[in-house]
């Protein structure tokens, strides 16, 4: 078969109006330039793919459109298109479009088989520097590692396996890795994390990743990612419906990991300390029990009312350990923490909590820009009443069935050692949801570009 050239033409509605006279009349009924519209025009030796971006396109909507196109057309595009016509876009907007094309090449497990994912390929008529292209690849590499891990079945993501993977990456990307096993956690007093881990068949892996940019006065970002490999609910067991989705309860950790890897590839001038308290939340005869009182790393005692509120237990020690032992400019935790945030926002945004309006704004802006939105919720004193316990300093849930995502954030605030710039991102429904590349819910990559954009700004 002879080579067929493939051209991709990008149009908004208004730019299509200006250009349509150069195409056959009949085409006008099939394509108008609306967002996510696509149309294929084929002749013997040339295929032209039209993609609509709509008139009110933004940076994030351009990524969204091209990502969708790339995913939808993965089996149809046979050769790499050699031409991209996107006249009205600025170089920066074109870069967003290309980022989407590359992000859309993802499938699980990731293999570089999509015709648009091609190391040696350059779009013929686009003037983007090598640097810009490697930036796109760096973002994809971090995001795909994140998605691949989140998508793995529960029996492929046991703690030793995930830790071994992190270790392997630490050699490749040159960051430090250390961890505390169950015995070491006991010696250190990481009692809140251990309570969750004690029912597990696997050892504890309270893991610390440390990346130093070696740039003078680089800001230090402390990240904690919820890393519950599978959340059965423990003794407060979850119902069976949709239980398989609880393999996604390490979504905070994979977002942190993806951002770390991309940041290193991009050589961002930031130092990163990331804590991933790795465990599963199992049902077993050793599992922690409702009514248990445990002592967290910072000495506070916690009454366990519900063993399914395990994420805040692991994060409590992650945050305490990080804030006590490292000097950080920002302290940010990401977690698939509550169904409450899911019920409130669905898949429209993550819930944000922060004690610093400046940090809040930086994160909100990044989220808006990359299309991984956040919405700020309050940390009013009033909520403290909900976690007062009769037998301990705190209890891990409120007895009232209201505002659990705020209750959880209020709980976490007790473990940040008064860090002046802390943010908590409850991203339960965001990192695992409906995607173009899978029938079932799957990893979205949420959080990676959000954190990257934030770290680029500071
Ligand atoms: N991992 C869940 C939160 C979650 C829910 C993530 C839905 C993704 C989708 C968390 O550990 C949990 O079980 N939370 C409980 C808390 C409750 C016991 C107060 C919840 O939200 O039901
Ligand atoms: Mg739970
Ligand atoms: Zn959980």
Image: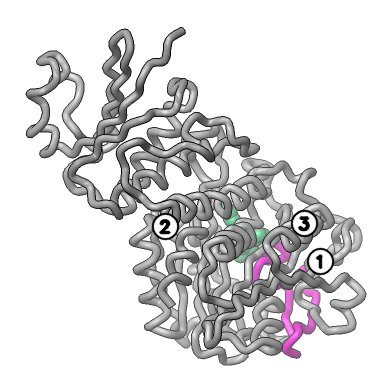
Image position of 50 with respect to 385: above or below: above
Image position of 142 with respect to 260: above or below: above
The image shows residue 300 at horizontal and vertical percentages of 72, 88
Residue drawn at x 30%, y 25% as measured from the top left: 49
Q: Please give the residue where the numbered disc 3 appears in the rendered image.
A: 168
Disc 3 vs disc 2: Cβ atoms closer than 8 Å? no
Residue drawn at x 40%, y 44% as measured from the top left: 100
Q: CA distance from mark 2 to mark 1?
A: 29 Å
Q: Is mark 1 within 8 Å of ligand 3?
A: no
The image shows residue 280 at horizontal and vertical percentages of 77, 58
Quadrant of the snapshot with the C terminus? bottom left
Q: CA distance from mark 3 to mark 1?
A: 15 Å
Q: Please give the residue where the numbered disc 2 appears in the rendered image.
A: 372
Element marked by disc 3: helix
Residue 42 relative to residue 114: left or right: left
Residue drawn at x 39%, y 60% as measured from the top left: 373
Element marked by disc 1: strand
Query: Which mark sits nearer the N-terminus, 2 or 1?
Result: 1
Residue 110 is labelled as none
């Amino acid at each position: 078969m002879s080579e067929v050239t493939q051209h991709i033409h990008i149009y908004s509605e208004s730019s299509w109006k200006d250009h349509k006279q150069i195409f056959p009349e009949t085409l006008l009924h099939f394509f108008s330039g609306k967002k996510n519209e696509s149309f294929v025009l084929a002749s013997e030796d040339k295929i032209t793919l039209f993609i609509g971006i709509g008139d009110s396109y933004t940076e994030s909507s351009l990524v969204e459109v091209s990502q969708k196109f790339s995913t939808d057309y993965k089996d149809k595009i046979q050769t790499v298109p050699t031409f991209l016509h996107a006249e009205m876009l600025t170089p920066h907007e074109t870069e967003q479009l290309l980022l989407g094309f590359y992000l859309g090449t993802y499938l699980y497990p990731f293999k570089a088989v999509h015709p648009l994912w091609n190391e040696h390929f350059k779009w013929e008529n686009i003037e983007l520097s090598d640097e810009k292209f490697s930036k796109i690849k760096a973002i994809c590499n971090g995001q795909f590692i994140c998605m691949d891990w989140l998508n793995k079945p529960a029996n492929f993501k046991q703690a030793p396996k995930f830790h071994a993977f992190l270790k392997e990456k630490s050699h490749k990307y040159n960051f430090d890795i250390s961890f505390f096993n169950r015995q070491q956690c006991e010696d250190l007093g990481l009692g809140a994390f251990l309570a969750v881990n004690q029912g597990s068949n696997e050892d504890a892996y309270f893991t610390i990743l440390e990346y130093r940019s070696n740039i003078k006065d680089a800001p230090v970002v402390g990240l904690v990612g919820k890393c519950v490999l599978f959340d059965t609910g423990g003794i407060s067991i979850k119902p069976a419906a949709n239980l398989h989705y609880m393999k996604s309860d390490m979504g905070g950790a994979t977002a942190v990991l993806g951002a770390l890897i991309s940041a290193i590839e991009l050589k961002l001038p930031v130092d990163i300390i990331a804590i991933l308290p790795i465990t599963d939340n199992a049902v077993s005869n050793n599992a922690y029990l409702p009514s248990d009182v445990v002592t967290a790393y910072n000495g506070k005692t916690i009454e366990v009312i519900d063993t399914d509120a395990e994420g805040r237990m692991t994060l409590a020690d992650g945050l305490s350990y990080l804030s006590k032992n490292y000097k950080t400019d920002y302290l940010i935790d990401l977690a698939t923490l509550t169904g409450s945030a899911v019920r409130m926002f669905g898949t429209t945004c993550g819930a944000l909590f922060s004690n610093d309006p400046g940090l809040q704004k930086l994160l909100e802006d990044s989220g808006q820009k990359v299309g991984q939105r956040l919405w700020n919720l309050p940390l009013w004193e009033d909520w403290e009443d909900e976690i007062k316990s009769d037998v301990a300093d705190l209890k891990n849930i409120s007895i009232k069935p209201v505002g659990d995502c705020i209750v959880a954030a209020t709980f976490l605030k007790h473990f940040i050692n008064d860090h002046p710039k802390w943010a908590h991102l409850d991203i339960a429904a965001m990192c695992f949801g409906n995607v173009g590349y899978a029938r079932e819910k799957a990893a979205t990559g949420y959080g990676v570009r959000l954190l990257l954009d934030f770290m680029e700004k500071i």
